[in-house]
Amino acid sequence: MRIGITCYPTYGGSGAVATELGIQLADRGHEVHFISYAQPFRLTTFHDRLFYHEVDVHTYPLFEYPPYSLSLAVEIHAVAKERDLDLLHAHYAIPHATAAWTAKEMLRHEGSDLPIATTLHGTDITLVGQDPAFWSITKFSVERSDGLTAVSDFLRDETFRAFDCPRCDIAVIPNFVDPAIYDRTQYECHASTLAPHGEKIVMHISNFRKVKRIEDVVRVFARIRDRLPARLVLIGDGPERSTAQEVADGLGVADHVLFLGKLESVAELLACADLLLLPSEQESFGLVALEAMSSGTPVVGTSGSGLSEVVEHGRTGFLHPVGEVEPMAESGVLLLEDENLWSACSAAARERAVSEFSVDRVVPMYEAFYEQVIERSRANSRVGA
Ligand code: GMT
């Protein structure tokens, strides 16, 4: 198949999933065209079936806000025609599903069709999409896609609830991981650099947005640190970075917190983590938790959203209600102090990541889904003709 993929190229789960999927599809013989305003951050190596088309975000003195969605639609339209795309896969509804629909309409007026699959990732539905500024266009674009996937049951149900979407038929295709890359046995751990005195390594990786509750990461860590020697390794960056620094200063643990900034590849670091903290307000899935589990790193995080479909409480980690830092710290201490419990959780986490969420299991689900979307789009255009 010739597949177009549009996604956010920046540090974040939806861009990571879109890029890893494109690479896997290319490995399986498909031709894949990424369409975005910058090269996706995980697209780092040459592949003869992978192409990147940069959207020319045109500026003009009249435009206080250059219309990216229109420029994206123009590029999707052009790539679809030039490369004879069989399908366009939009990751994160806003504005990708909208631009995809616009390109599809342009092509329809020229007598051709572009089947559109949209994957809903998280805040496009749970937060941004529900803002009155975006609600109606999100609903419209989601309903106009020829096929929809959500990364968890939680997100599918939230889409039905928030968008009252009777026309939506949403397939749940979970996020995936490559167990050969996220494998702690494959790397020489840099523990002596991260934790020079043999402290336990507690890690958090995110784009440091409010929804991640970075202050809870530091609060949980400070409580763990009260009980045992530990270092907090923070990877990523974003608006809440200074909050993390302030809370660490306030709690007197700043000397034990390491800010590593944005890193392209985290497999090597996860391989020497003893614990991953993910105390988010909400996670539609929590890709980084899966990457940690595949690396044999237990997770302590929050219950009540999609993370519960990834982490099994008491087996591969521990989940507690949002904001309950005391029990989260208690679970962290339990894991870090009890070697047998840690080893059992680590092994169970790895086993679950491999059996439920490996590339080999999930990528074929997308391939099968694409076939259905192409069929549905053909049927829709026959009805519309
Ligand atoms: O919704 C977002 O925050 C954007 C997105 C991203 O680009 O970081 O993250 C979401 O998509 C990931 C990949 O499917 C999921 O693993 C994350 O759980 C999800 N984030 C939230 O739901 C907060």
Image (cartoon, grey):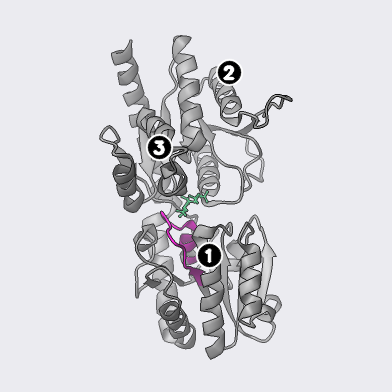
Which residue sits at x=53%, y=90%? 227
Q: Is residue 2 visible?
A: no
Q: Which residue is mark 3?
A: 367
Where residue 257 sits in the image (x, y, percent)?
65, 75
Mark 2 falls on what kind of element? helix
| The label number, if any, that marks residue 97 in the structure image | none
Where residue 29 sits in the image (x, y, percent)?
51, 35
Distance from disc 2 to disc 3, alpha carbons, whole Å, reads 22 Å
241 to 73, vertically: above or below? below
Q: Amino acid at mark 1?
A: Asp
Residue reaching furthest left? Answer: 166
Mark 1 falls on what kind of element? loop
Q: Amino acid at mark 2?
A: Glu
Q: Which residue is mark 2?
A: 82
Magenta stretch: give its range: 276-292
On screen, residue 55 versus residue 1, left or right, reads right
Label 2: few (<14), some or many (≥20) within 10 Å?
Answer: few
| The label number, if any, that marks residue 183 in the structure image | 1
Which residue sits at x=71%, y=27%? 59
Quarter placement of the C terminus: top left
Q: Amino acid at mark 3?
A: Glu
Which residue sits at x=61%, y=81%? 251
Residue 241 among magenta residues: no
**Going from the N terminus, do you reach mark 3 or mark 1 first?**
1
Residue 277 among magenta residues: yes
Tell us which disc is closer to us: 2 or 3: 2
Distance from disc 1 to disc 2, alpha carbons, whole Å, reads 40 Å
